[in-house]
Structures are given as C-alpha cells and as structure tokens.
Image (cartoon, helix red, strand yellow):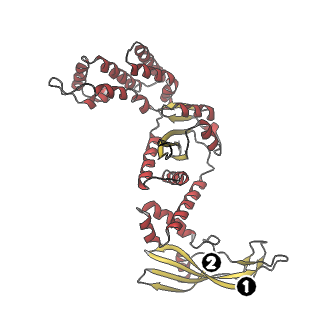
C-alpha cells in the first residue's frame, strides 16, 4: 500500500520505483524506475507485442517537490513489432510524457504557474532548474493549450469592443493599436486582434460561430468599430459608452479654463470643481460656480452643455432622454463656439447609439477594466515584440 501511494503521488502512472538517490547539497532527488506491464502496442500498426529488442535509460525532469529538483531516470524497453509486414522497432510510451520530450507534462504545467507568479525569468530558472529556452517555449505552448480549450465557444449575447496601444512602429514612429473583444456574459476576454480595419476584423473573427446570437455591442465613439458591428452582427444593437459621451465637453472646457484664472480674491473657486457633475456638489458650491460663470459666457455655454449631458443619463427611459438631447442640439445650433458645433454634430451622429443605453443600461466599463489588465501585462514584461505571445498572455490573464 505505501508503495502504491508513493507511485501515485511522486511518479507517473504505470511507473514502478526501483531505487532513488537523494542529494542534500544540491536539493535534488533522482527516482530510478521502469515501466510496469509486459505488453506494448505498436504505434505504426496497432498490434500488441511482447518481444523486447533492447533497453535504454532516459532522464526526464519532473516538477519540483518541496523546493527540490526531481529527476525521473526511466529504464525503457524498445519493442519489436510482431505484426506481419511491420517488424518495426519502437520505444514504449509513458503516460504524462510527450514523445521525445525531456520534461513531464506536470513540469509544463508547473512552468505555466511559475511564469505567472514569479517576478522574472531568472527566478523561474532558479526554481525549476531548467534553461531559458525551455521555459519560454513550454510556457507559450501551455498558453496555447489553455486558449484552445475555449476556442470553439460561440459568440455571447453581449460583447464589448475597445482598443489600446501595443507597440511603436519602428519605421514610421507611430503607435500601433490592437482591438480587444470582451465576452460580457462569461466576464472574460474573447479575442485580441492586431488591427482596427473592418475587413481584417471580419476575416480574423470568422472562426467564431454564432455571430447572429450577439444582441448588444458596447463601444466608445469609434466610427470604424460601429461600421464593423453593423456589418458583422446583424441582430445587434450598438450602445455608445456612457462615460465617453459625458466627457465630450470636458476637453473644450479644460481648454478655455486654462485661459482664465479661477481663484481670485472674490472667488476661491478650484478649477476641478467645474469639471465635476454639479449634482454631486453642495448647493453653496453650485451657487459660487454659477456666479463665477456670469463673467465668462463662453465657459458658461460649454459648462451648461456638460451639465445637460449629465442630466440625460439621469433619465429613466429613452423618450425623456431624446427630448433633452433634442433641446440641447437645438441650443448648440445657435452657438458660435466651434467646439460646441462639433459636439452637436457628434451627438446627432451617435443619437441612436446613445439612446440604446436606456434599454439595458450597459456600459463599456468591463472592457476598460481589461484594458487596464493589458497595461499591467505590458508593464510587467517591459513590452512585447511578438504579438502572438502578447495575445496568448493577455487571453490567459483575462480568462
């Protein structure tokens, strides 16, 4: 009984322990073992055979146990097939070790864990006692396997689309961006693509089945992503992200605030108070803001547009929100501020997508959260050069 427990815990299935060596100075344990069972099956023709051609000893590295390096010294038999017309020589296989591999599958899973939790490659090498090339190769092989486990999952009912910067183009100097597609139903990253072009997005996402199942697509105010969603998801409603809409007037407001001084002897008004939602401010603070705005008509006009957009998202239904937006666009049509004219054009262009928010109150917050994870992944690795490696790492981090 104890021997079986030792075999099940420390060794691999069908391995029989014959001896072991313990090296205390180097924290290393070597298990000498052989394969149990007299019969083997030919990998070429499938016939069983018992004829042993010769024997060879192979050394396999296993996952560390209690901070000690574990080595499996396996005495393998080479069989000769007894099938007619075959007569080929083959080496018996051990469950848990891939053909021609020098590390166990358990070691490969340990590499995945170590790379995910250790700070750098040097620490991983010291712990696993294997080379850099092995860690690098096996780590991304395990990430590929993890992705393939859910590769065939179909499209969910709700997705989010956003972009973030990946690498700087060496030839032209501009930043290259990648597209993230987020599965809202399962709260994980669905896919990462090295493009923002409609045609390339459609081509690279074609392997995912069931695009007619998508009912909601959340995104920022990107015309390219809107064109892609309209053409690729026929049954989906596009929802403009609430936070991107609300912050549309903030940039021109900050621009004009830089030209004036808010804190004077008469008004101790901090600039950041003008950027906040007035519904969250005290009555005295709001009164002070509106008193200061009387002397700055341009800033007042932009500020009122900002407050009106905040008021839109306090509505309970799309009908009420539409009436407020109609009044806002009519007022902006008479404005002489160029930024407000541009704001009116944007609101009219995205009016249907803005109003779709009120059906289920979905935002792009989850996608923005995964964007933050992507930045942490890049920061930890000091950047990536290979996009496929970055994609696999990010998909695993956002499972």
x, y percent for residue 105: 57, 68
Give the residue at the far right of this rendering.
Answer: 84
Give the residue at the far front of this rendering.
Answer: 171
Question: Can you tell which quarter of the image residue 230 is in?
Answer: top right
The numbered mark at residue 14 is 2
- The answer to whether residue 102 is above or below residue 197 is below
Q: Earlier in the sequence, mark 1 or mark 2?
A: 2
Sort mark 1 into few (<14), some (14-19) or many (20+) by Cα contacts within 10 Å: some
> Is 148 on the left or on the right of 371, as rendered?
right
Q: Which residue is mark 1?
A: 52
In percent of the image, x 25 and y 16: which residue is there? 294
- The answer to whether residue 199 is above or below residue 384 is above
x, y percent for residue 160: 52, 39
Instruction: Give the SS element for disc 2.
Output: loop
- Asked whether the beta carbons under mark 1 and mark 2 sit within 8 Å of each other, the answer is no
Question: CA–CA distance between discs 1 and 2?
Answer: 18 Å
Instruction: Give the SS element for disc 1.
Output: strand
> Is 255 on the left or on the right of 173, as rendered?
left
In percent of the image, x 45 and y 69: which residue is there? 125
> Is 59 on the left or on the right of 257, as rendered?
right
x, y percent for residue 285: 23, 26
x, y percent for residue 313: 41, 27
> Which circle, 1 or 2, is nearer the viewer?
1
- The answer to whether residue 86 is above or below residue 275 is below
**Residue closest to the eye, 298 or 16:** 298
**Residue closest to the eye, 133 or 50:** 133
- The answer to whether residue 190 is above or below residue 40 is above
The numbered mark at residue 4 is none
Q: Give the quadrant of the N terminus.
A: bottom right
> Is 394 on the left or on the right of 282, as rendered?
right
In percent of the image, x 27 and y 18: which residue is there? 296
């Amino acid at each position: 009984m104890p021997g079986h427990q030792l075999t099940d815990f420390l060794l691999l299935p069908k391995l029989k322990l014959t001896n072991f060596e313990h090296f205390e100075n180097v924290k290393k344990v070597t298990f000498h073992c052989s394969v149990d069972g007299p019969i083997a099956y030919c990998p070429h023709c499938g016939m069983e055979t018992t004829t042993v051609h010769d024997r060879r000893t192979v050394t396999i590295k296993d996952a560390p146990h209690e901070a000690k390096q574990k080595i499996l010294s396996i005495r393998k038999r080479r069989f000769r097939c007894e099938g007619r017309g075959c007569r080929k020589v083959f080496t018996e296989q051990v469950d848990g070790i891939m053909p021609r591999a020098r590390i166990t599958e358990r070691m490969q899973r340990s590499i995945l864990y170590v790379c995910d939790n250790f700070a750098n490659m040097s620490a991983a090498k010291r712990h696993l006692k294997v080379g850099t090339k092995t860690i690098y190769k096996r780590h991304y092989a395990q990430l590929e396997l993890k992705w393939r486990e859910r590769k065939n999952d179909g499209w969910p009912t709700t997705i989010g689309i956003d972009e973030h910067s990946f690498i700087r183009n060496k030839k032209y100097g501009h930043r290259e961006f990648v597209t993230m597609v987020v599965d809202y139903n399962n709260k994980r990253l669905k896919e990462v693509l090295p493009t923002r072009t409609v045609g390339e997005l459609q081509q690279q996402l074609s392997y995912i089945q069931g695009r007619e199942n998508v009912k909601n697509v959340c995104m920022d105010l990107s015309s390219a992503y809107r064109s892609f969603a309209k053409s690729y998801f026929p049954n989906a409603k596009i929802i403009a992200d609430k936070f991107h809409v609300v912050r549309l007037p903030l940039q021109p407001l900050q621009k004009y605030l830089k030209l004036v001084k808010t804190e004077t002897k008469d008004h101790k008004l901090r600039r950041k108070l003008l950027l906040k939602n007035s519904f969250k401010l005290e009555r005295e603070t709001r009164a002070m803001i509106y008193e200061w705005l009387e002397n700055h008509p341009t800033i007042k006009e932009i500020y009122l547009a900002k407050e009106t957009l905040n008021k839109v998202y306090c509505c309970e239904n799309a009908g009420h929100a539409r009436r407020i937006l109609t009044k806002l666009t009519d007022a902006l049509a008479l404005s002489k501020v160029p930024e407000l004219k541009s704001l009116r054009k944007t609101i009219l262009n995205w009016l249907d997508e803005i109003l779709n928010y009120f059906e289920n109150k979905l935002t792009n917050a989850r996608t923005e959260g995964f964007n933050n994870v992507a930045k942490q992944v890049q920061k930890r690795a000091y950047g990536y050069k290979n996009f496929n490696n970055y994609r696999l790492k990010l998909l695993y981090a956002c499972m």
